Amino acid sequence: ETGVTQTPRHLVMGMTNKKSLKCEQHLGHNAMYWYKQSAKKPLELMFVYSLEERVENNSVPSRFSPECPNSSHLFLHLHTLQPEDSALYLCASSQDLGHTDTQYFGPGTRLTVL
Amino acid sequence: DQQVKQNSPSLSVQEGRISILNCDYTNSMFDYFLWYKKYPAEGPTFLISISSIKDKNEDGRFTVFLNKSAKHLSLHIVPSQPGDSAVYFCAASARYGGSQGNLIFGKGTKLSVKP
């Protein structure tokens, strides 16, 4: 499989649940990203990893916990979420962190928090 | 405060005609701009980009124009095809500044191309 894949594609969870989103890239890239897209809002950058080290955390609540075990995999661990966290969560990767490095996106996970 | 604005949430165009999608930005540090296209149930896919040292970049039916003095860019699609129907996102990044390399996105414009 090529490109950026995300699982699951859809997730419904209660506010007390713990779940994880998974992203995998098959492009040999060194940088990976988590974005959130809420209805009627632009994509918001959540986390940036470069060579498995977190380089940016855009004031994201601690109920979202990222993990990057290697340069091909990125996880977003979720616990005690709120209904307003319902959104499309997109993973992306790029060759490096250069500002002209094209980011390639996965299909996203549609998350609903009840 | 939005740094990248796409003021038209939707646009409808007849097949074969030109589609023009607009984007405005406020941060003068932005020096690299991109357009992404997104179909339902898929992630955004990169379409075309332009550096601030240029005012035009063309790739097949797609041309991006940059007007730095007006802080405005536009994407022209000609001729438009029904398969172009999608949401188009404008994005910008800066070499320098607090979040260099990060992409700042607009809200998107939904393009519908009617046969």
Image (cartoon, rainbow, N blue to C red):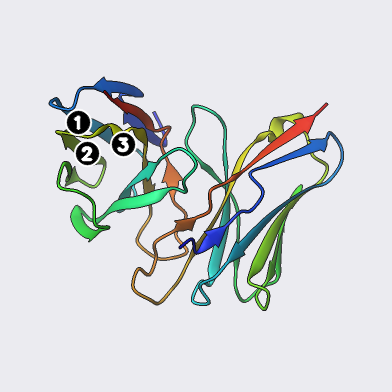
Q: Residue at x 56, y 62 (%)?
A: B33
Percent across and percent down for residue B54 are: 66, 73
| Pointer 2 with pointer 1, Cβ within 8 A | yes
| Mark 1: few/some/many CA within 10 Å (<14, 14-19, 20+) | some
Percent across and percent down for residue A40 are: 50, 41
Q: Split into 4 quadrants, where in the image is the C terminus of chain B?
A: top right
- Residue in front for this viewpoint, A31 or B105: B105
Q: Split into 4 quadrants, where in the image is the N terminus of chain B?
A: bottom left
Relative to A97, is A55 on the left or the right?
Answer: left
Percent across and percent down for residue A41 are: 46, 46
Disc 2 element = strand
Instruction: List the residue tagged with mark 1.
Output: A20
- Residue in front for this viewpoint, A63 or A100: A63
- Chain letter for the residue marked with disc 2 in the picture: A
Task: State which tag comes first along the sequence, 2 or 3.
Answer: 2
Relative to A62, is A99 on the left or the right?
Answer: right
| Pointer 2 with pointer 3, Cβ within 8 A | no
The vertical placement of A81 against B47, above or below, is above
| Mark 3: few/some/many CA within 10 Å (<14, 14-19, 20+) | few
Task: Give the residue type that dot 2 points to.
Answer: Leu
Label ID, residue A84 = 3
Task: Give the residue type that dot 1 points to.
Answer: Ser
Q: CA distance from mark 1 to mark 3?
A: 17 Å
Q: Residue at x 68, y 68 (%)?
A: B66
Task: State which tag comes first along the sequence, 1 or 3.
Answer: 1
